[in-house]
Image (tube, grey):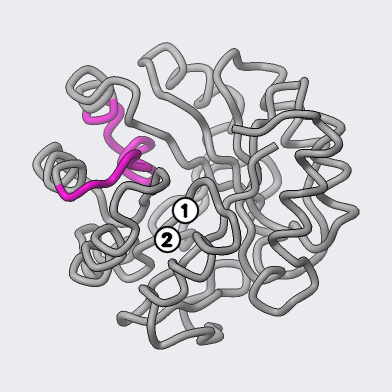
Amino acid sequence: MLLIPAIDLKDGQCVRLKQGNMDDATIFSADPVEMAMKWVESGARRLHLVDLNGAIAGKPVNEGVIIDILDAVGGAIPVQLGGGIRDLDTIERYLDDGLSYVIIGTAAVKNPGFLHDACGAFPGQIIVGLDAKEGKVATDGWSKISGHDVVDLAKKYEGYGVEAIIYTDIGRDGMLGGVNIEATVRLANALTIPVIASGGITNLDDVKLLCGVEHEGVMGAICGRSIYEGTLDFAKGQALADELNGKSY
């Protein structure tokens, strides 16, 4: 089980939102590069970046800070990024800058042809982010709820050749209320590609729960507010996951 620290970027700062609300942001650091290196030094094996402004604008906004983070990490661990990625040129530019995986969210729902082309052009480097509320997929920085079912869309995208699915329960994100294990496992059971859980991971008990379903296809969890506010010690969480599953990535 891989624990992945999240660095959510708004106006060049590292923040956390509650349930995706851009007006309800807590600033955790004015120096996202320093924060990224903190997690690397704490033993992170992957980083998760989100361009929150980009998700709303539909184009990269925090690209300068993202490049600074990639330069600082220097390829030591994989870095994945979502938010505002809507065309192949942007994907190619980010990958050339050192990004390992690109996460496509809104564009996958609104323009599946683009996702299909991206998977063909950049095999093994495209992840789809499916953010949902009560089983229905949200788009446009979580501001709109579509009529699409999460499982149905994920199975469709699996056929395109995506590398993994990041599943976020909007209702739990940033609320420290625990992971929606049932919905996450239901999605993982419907797919053959890995699922990464996101939203609600709070403490070591959640790590234990996730480790218990790793065999179901849940290969990791994105950690945000919990590791910033201290309800979960990241290094201890990853060590526990390694102990319980008897392996590392």
Q: Is residue 56 magenta?
A: no
Q: Callout 2: 10 Å neighbours few (<14), some, many (20+)? A: many
Where residue 75 appears, x then y in whole percent?
A: 31, 47
User: Closer to the camera, 40 or 133?
Assistant: 40
In the rendered image of this protein, does residue 202 appear above or below residue 16? above
Instruction: Give SS at disc 2.
Output: loop
Indicate which disc residue 3 carries. none
N-terminal label among 1 and 2: 1
Instruction: Identify the image quadrant of the N terminus.
Output: top right
In the rendered image of this protein, does residue 32 appear above or below residue 218? below
Write the residue at 18% across / 70% down.
64
**Amino acid type indicated by mark 1:** Leu
Q: Is residue 114 magenta?
A: yes
Q: Is residue 235 left or right of residue 109?
A: right
> In the figure, residue 243 lies in which quadrant?
top right
Q: Which residues are magenta?
A: 97-115
In this view, the mark in front (1 or 2): 1
In the rendered image of this protein, does residue 93 appear above or below residue 54? above
Q: Callout 1: 10 Å neighbours few (<14), some, many (20+)? A: many
Residue marked by disc 1: 47
Where residue 5 appears, x then y in whole percent?
A: 56, 58
Q: Is residue 113 left or right of residue 149?
A: left
Disc 1 and disc 2: Cα gap in Å?
20 Å
Indicate which disc residue 141 carries. 2
Where residue 80 appears, x then y in whole percent?
A: 39, 47
Write the residue at 80% across / 29% down.
246
Write the residue at 27% across / 34% down.
111
Instruction: Give SS at disc 1.
Output: strand
User: Closer to the camera, 134 or 68?
Assistant: 68
